[in-house]
Image (cartoon, rainbow, N blue to C red):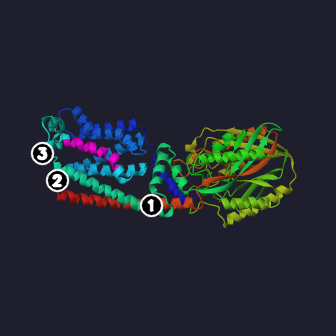
């Protein structure tokens, strides 16, 4: 993840899960009752509270109940939870404007008329705000979106019309009509200043604000359509839907910008001699992102669940451009895993683990027959993802006439969060990429020349007491110890997204029961739903983590037994984000957010100024 991508992911901290609709409605009615106590002055406190609920809370209640079905009849996607939260927010906006206007009227000669004008402004403002949200979530055109967006303002206007006695100014209807549509005697005196022209003024303001919303969306949308060919509203709707309610709307947006790609899927399987599988390393050259369970964000768990033995899904050499666009694509990967598994030819021998350093890269691996497992890390240097092209080149160099197939793992085990301009990305042409490529060639030759002996395998696993909010995914920690000729190599896989600096070295220095040890993370993005950086060791006690890993390595040593091992690869055609799409998406979104905040402020200033002129001229 680059700094630009990190800025985009960091925006998720401003999004929260929408509360249940009944919670929002209950809170709205409570706030309305308290506002009634402060705003009205009748003989009884309970009457004041009831008037607050009726005049302020009732439009919120109606908007919460009616907006979702109206929106869905028009082909929209507004849920009751979102609609209730939106209505509550609009109620709070109206209350805030009225309270501010009331304070101003106390200290100035503006009087009650100013407060009522502020109410008209607030009702038009919440219509505009609801219009913006409905257009963003349901993707209606403006005239269609105006129907569900106008519910809260419309109900409030009807109440004003009936209980202000506006009907008395109109020569229409008879006694029966007036008894239902003109009830000033049942209303507080604060409402008796309303005139028929005020409703015309409200309509004018709503039209004015709707035009401002339309213009704002057109301006904001233009950069997205020029750079990505899609609408910013599609991304906004999907992003909010995923974070606030766990929906998969975002995948539809990613499908529109995705590209087809062929990716290798490599499987290293260990089984009891002529018996069932004991453990399986699976490495599709895919990045497990972008976040949560969207796309391939939960790929490690899905891969591990498909293994007959204990599944190990480490991180491949691929960046965010190789995120799967939808969760459906995960099944395509799993199908390739099954094909590769069927091709495996097992053998009884392997080489002892070997390790070498090349520049900043440290490579650890061992051969199983004519194939090899290789892990790479740049720790204690900071590094994030290794680009797909660099990984392919390193695999080719490791084979280079020495070996048939390589399972090349990015250990992904040391990073400094989102600090710095590029976060240690290993890209083609960079010095680190050549360190990895040359190191892979040297290690491949050494493993091909090394003596092989019967192999034994021991495994252990613990789901841990930690959860994704603390940086640990559902797979917890998994350990495999491979012993060949009395030499033991330990592979520790933590289901997380990278590690705090120095933690890898602390683990390898503390755990001394094996001759070689490498610590890897799966790079699962299920831990990054709300935080862009949530690395292993950031939120959990490092001492407890090291102690648990030490215990699991000991358990794996006790589990050592003879096994057969084999490796095979298949290609899978999947839809991924595509070359440079992630950076384009992130940079465009960040630019629009920065520009949008300034533009929104400018639009607010302009429409408020025009509103003041309208009030002065009418």
Q: Which residues are magenta?
A: 145-161
Mark closest to the chain's N terminus, 3 or 1 = 3
Instruction: Indicate the position of residue 385 as horizontal and vertical percent values.
Output: 63, 57
Q: Secondary structure at mark 2?
A: loop
The answer for how far apart the CA atoms under marks 2 and 1 are is: 40 Å
Residue nearest the viewer, comparing 538 with 527 = 527
Q: Secondary structure at mark 3?
A: helix
Residue 261 belongs to the span the image colors magenta: no
State which mark lies toward you, 3 or 1. Answer: 3
Residue 153 belongs to the span the image colors magenta: yes
Which residue in the protein does label 1 denote? 592
Mark closest to the chain's N terminus, 2 or 1 = 2
Which residue in the protein does label 2 denote? 110
Instruction: Indicate the position of residue 618 as horizontal and vertical percent values.
Output: 17, 57
Q: Are marks 2 and 1 in contact (CB under 8 Å)?
A: no
Q: Is residue 335 left or right of residue 182?
A: right
Please give the label number shown on residue 460. none
Q: Secondary structure at mark 1?
A: helix
The answer for how far apart the CA atoms under marks 2 and 3 are is: 24 Å
Instruction: Indicate the position of residue 171 as horizontal and vertical percent values.
Output: 11, 44
Q: Are marks 3 and 1 in contact (CB under 8 Å)?
A: no
Question: Residue shown at 27%/45% (left/top)?
Answer: 154
């Amino acid at each position: 993840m680059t700094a630009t991508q990190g800025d985009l992911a960091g925006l998720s901290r401003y999004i929260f899960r929408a509360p249940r609709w009944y919670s929002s409605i209950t809170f709205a009615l409570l706030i309305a009752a308290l506002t009634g106590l402060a705003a009205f002055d009748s003989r009884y406190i309970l009457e004041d509270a009831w008037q607050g609920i009726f005049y302020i809370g009732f439009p919120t209640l109606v908007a919460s109940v009616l907006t979702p079905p109206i929106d869905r009849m028009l082909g929209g996607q507004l849920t009751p939870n979102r609609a209730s939260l939106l209505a509550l927010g609009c109620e709070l906006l109206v209350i805030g404007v009225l309270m501010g206007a009331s304070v101003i009227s106390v200290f100035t000669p503006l009087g009650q008329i100013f407060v009522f004008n502020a109410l008209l402004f607030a009702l038009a403002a919440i219509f505009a705000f609801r219009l913006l949200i409905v257009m963003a979530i349901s993707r209606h055109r403006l005239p269609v979106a105006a129907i569900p967006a106008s519910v809260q303002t419309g109900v409030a206007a009807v109440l004003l019309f009936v209980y202000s006695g506006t009907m008395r100014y109109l020569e229409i209807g008879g006694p029966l009509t007036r008894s239902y549509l003109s009830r000033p005697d049942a209303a507080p005196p604060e409402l008796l200043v309303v005139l028929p022209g005020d409703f015309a003024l409200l309509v004018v303001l709503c039209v004015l604000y709707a035009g401002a919303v339309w213009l704002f969306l057109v301006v904001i949308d233009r950069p997205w359509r020029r750079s990505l060919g899609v609408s910013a509203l599609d991304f906004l709707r999907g992003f909010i839907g995923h974070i606030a309610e766990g929906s998969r709307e975002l995948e539809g947006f990613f499908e529109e910008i995705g590209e087809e790609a062929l990716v290798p899927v490599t499987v290293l399987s260990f089984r009891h001699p002529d018996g069932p599988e004991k453990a399986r390393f699976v490495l599709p050259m895919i990045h497990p992102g972008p976040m949560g369970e969207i796309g391939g964000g939960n790929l490690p768990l899905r891969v591990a669940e498909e293994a007959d033995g204990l599944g190990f899904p480490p991180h491949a050499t691929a960046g965010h451009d190789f995120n799967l666009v939808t969760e459906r694509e995960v099944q395509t990967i799993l199908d390739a895993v099954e094909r590769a598994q069927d091709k495996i030819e097992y053998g009884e021998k392997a080489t002892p683990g070997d390790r070498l350093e090349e520049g900043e890269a440290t490579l650890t691996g061992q051969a199983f027959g004519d194939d090899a497992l290789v892990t790479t890390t740049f720790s204690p240097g900071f590094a994030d993802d290794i680009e797909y092209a660099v990984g392919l080149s390193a695999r080719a160099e490791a084979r280079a006439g020495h070996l048939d197939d390589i399972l090349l793992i990015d250990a992904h085990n040391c990073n400094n969060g989102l600090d710095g301009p590029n976060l240690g990305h290993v890209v083609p042409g960079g010095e680190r990429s050549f360190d990895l490529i040359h190191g892979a060639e040297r290690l491949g030759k050494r493993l091909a020349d090394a003596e092989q002996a019967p192999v034994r395998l021991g495994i252990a696993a613990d789901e841990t007491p930690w959860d994704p909010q603390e940086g640990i995914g559902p797979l917890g920690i998994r350990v495999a110890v491979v012993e060949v000729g009395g030499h033991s190599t330990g592979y520790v896989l933590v289901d997380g997204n990278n590690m705090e600096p120095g933690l890898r070295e602390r683990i390898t220095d503390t755990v001394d029961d094996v001759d070689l040890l490498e610590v890897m993370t799966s790079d699962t993005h299920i831990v990054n739903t709300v935080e862009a950086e949530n690395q292993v060791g950031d939120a959990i006690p490092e001492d407890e983590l090291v102690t648990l890993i030490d215990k699991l390595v000991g358990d794996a040593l006790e589990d050592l037994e003879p096994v057969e091992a084999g490796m095979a690869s298949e290609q899978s055609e999947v839809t991924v984000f595509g070359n440079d799409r992630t950076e384009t998406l992130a940079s465009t979104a960040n630019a629009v957010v920065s520009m949008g905040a300034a533009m929104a402020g400018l639009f607010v200033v302009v429409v408020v100024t025009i509103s003041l002129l309208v009030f002065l001229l009418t």
